[in-house]
Amino acid sequence: MLPPGLQTAVSVIYPARCLACGGLVDADFGLCGACWRDTAFIGGTVCDACGVPLPGHGDHLAPHCDACLATPRPWQQGRAALLYRDTGRKLVLALKHGDRQEIARPAALWLAQAARDILPPDALIAPVPLHWLRLLKRRYNQSALLAKALAAQTGQPWCADLLQRMRRTPALDGLGRAERFAALQHAIRVHPRRRHRLIGRPVVLVDDVLTSGATLSASAQVCLDAGSGPVYVLTLARVAKET
């Protein structure tokens, strides 16, 4: 930690900036008031499987949205921290495509808060994988940054390469639900030399955005097929239909 005097000097030269708009804020890794108000943090009654907000006041013990009722998920429970719109969308895109890796640190706080009621104490945290060619181009896996930061925040273990994407799949943006699920068939596997880490153990899969759930479904299923315990999913943002 820097001495107080040096900290003051650094803050004068490099003042803290809002993660979303770049405006001045009181502390590093924060949002200004306007961007905070424009960030749709998820709370209240949510789908127990994907984390999307639901109307009502939690009348059911484990409520599910229409999409999760129509297409049951292979994972046990899921949560998301933000809705994928406005500032939430800006933050996800900046982390994913803008080399704004520092966003992973505050995002881990939001993820831990969103998962506080479902996160098993003995779980292994793992990111959804990128194909090596895409990883080479992007230089980092944003889901791995989130998983690593979440592990540091919660004190739970994580495995960066628990899963491997064996086949390069097309970009899923713009594809329908059926096309997304078809594109992910046989594309992901458990790393043969990491399988021992998940046998009989809960796994928490971390990704940046949940849209249809195709990537997380493929990832969860290979974990279960490899002998894991129940699988949970956690995403920074959830795409939801406007109401």
Image: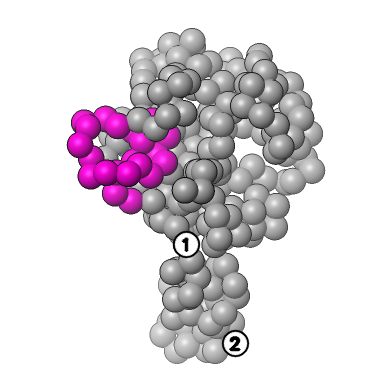
Residue, disc 2: 13
Q: How is the image coloured?
A: one colour
Spatial separation of the CA atoms under disc 1 and disc 2: 28 Å
Residue, disc 1: 39
User: What is the x, y in percent for residue 78?
Assistant: 39, 34
Work out whether residue 157 can be spotted.
no
- Point out the frontmost of discs 1 and 2: 1
User: What is the x, y in percent for residue 103?
Assistant: 55, 59
Residue at point 40%, 23% (across, down)? 69
> Tag 1: residue type?
Thr
Query: Height in image: 207 above or below 106?
Result: above
Query: Height in image: 36 above or below 203?
Result: below
Residue at point 79%, 43% (across, down)? 137
Rendered image quadrant of residue 62 = top left
User: What is the x, y in percent for residue 35?
Assistant: 50, 70
Residue range of the region highlighted in magenta in the rendering: 43-63
Quadrant where the N terminus is found in the figure: bottom left
Q: Identify the mark nearer the N-term, 1 or 2.
A: 2
Label 1 neighbourhood size at 10 Å, few (<14), some (14-19), many (20+)?
Answer: many
User: What is the x, y in percent for residue 47?
Assistant: 36, 36
